[in-house]
Image: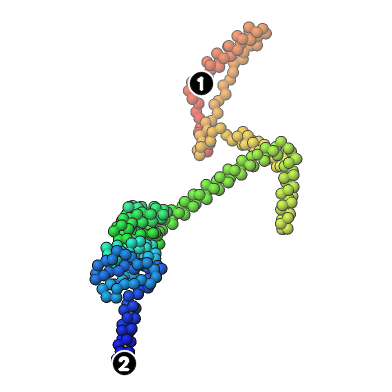
Amino acid sequence: MTVLIALIIILAAAGLALLALSVRPVQQYERGVVFRFGRLLPDIRGPGLRMIRPIGDRMRKVSVQTEVLGVSPQGAITADNVTVTVDAVVYFRVIDPVKALVNVNDYANAVSQIAQTSLRSVIGRADLDTLLSDRDHINAALKKVMDEPTEEPWGLRIERVEIKDIALPDQMKRSMSKQAEAERERRARVIAADGEYQASQKLSQAAGVMADTPGALQLRLLQTVVDVAAEKNSTLVMPFPVEMLRFFENQSTSALNGAARTEDLTQPATSTPHRTVIPAPAPVLPQPAVPVLADAAGESATRANVARTRRHHWPTTPPDTNLIRI
């Protein structure tokens, strides 16, 4: 009797052990792939308690969650020959557990290697401006390059690829900062010039309105006095008519013109040299007496005789001149 009870207990324990070996829990985010004596069974075990043969069957669980894989920094040369260091992150998940287990060994490591090579190839085809400004285009190109060798043969889906950081050389950073500074300065000057242009147009319109209404200028002057007095400072502003300023301006202009004309009259026509030679005056020759005629004809004849006499007695040789040096 005792031997029978012991045998029953042993059989019950063996049955419980076999039952424990036959039951496999599968989580909601997992899928079970069963191999019987090394051969793949076509049925994929879903979440829950799943029964397998305790002898000969082996279950491999594959997670179907989205996994995050960081890509180590990769040095590459862009299309415009700039050396950069880029690191990225890859989001992928398993869509076919059988292919992920059978077709590739350690699919996570395989995805990492594919991401590194794809990152270098995509960066080599893009220039630096596109790499810095159009990240979405680069990310889409990376995803497209990585989808081809992973989705169909390995049963993996690349959901998203993001470039985290782009490291540039120090010299390139300085050049880009100078370029950005020059661009901001150009925009600031253009905006300031546009503001001055608009302000000049408004001031021109305001001047036209004030010119049509003489009292508007006085009202604007009083408004300026009120604005200055509202600050409660020690400056005293007294309105001064613009017409009086114009009167003083006209008077000063007239005085300057008169002084200029006086200076032109007093100034000699030719400049005096440093050493001037002045000849001595010629001797005065005696003039012959000419009778005065009463009538006009006689007067004309007398003038002709006087002129002829003067030409006859004019000295042909130069007089003895004593040069006076100054």
Q: Which residue has dot 1 on it? A: 315
Q: Nearer the viewer, mark 2 or mark 1?
A: 2
Q: Which one is nearer the viewer's eye here, 313 or 1?
A: 1
Distance (Cα) linking label 2 and label 1: 189 Å
Q: Which one is nearer the viewer's eye here, 202 or 276?
A: 202
Q: Which one is nearer the viewer's eye here, 109 or 237?
A: 109
Crowding near the residue tagged with mark 2, few <14, some 14–19, many ≥20 C-alpha atoms within 10 Å: few
Q: Is residue 97 above or below residue 179?
A: below
187 sits left or right of 231 in the view: left
Residue type of the residue flagged with mark 1: Pro
Describe the element under mark 2 as helix, strand or loop. loop
From this viewpoint, which residue is outermost toward the bottom?
Answer: 2
Where is residue 290 shown, x and y percent of the image? 62, 13
- Which circle's residue, 2 or 1, is located before the other in the chain? 2
Where is residue 179 shown, x and y percent of the image? 43, 53
Describe the element under mark 1 as helix, strand or loop. loop
Residue type of the residue flagged with mark 2: Met
Q: Residue at x 39, y 59 (%)?
A: 160
Q: Residue at x 58, y 45 (%)?
A: 196
User: Which label was assigned to residue 63?
Assistant: none
Q: Residue at x 53, y 36 (%)?
A: 272
61 sits left or right of 241 in the view: left
Where is residue 95 shown, x and y percent of the image? 35, 61
Q: Which residue has dot 2 on it? A: 1
Q: Quadrant of residue 156?
A: bottom left
Q: Quadrant of residue 307?
A: top right
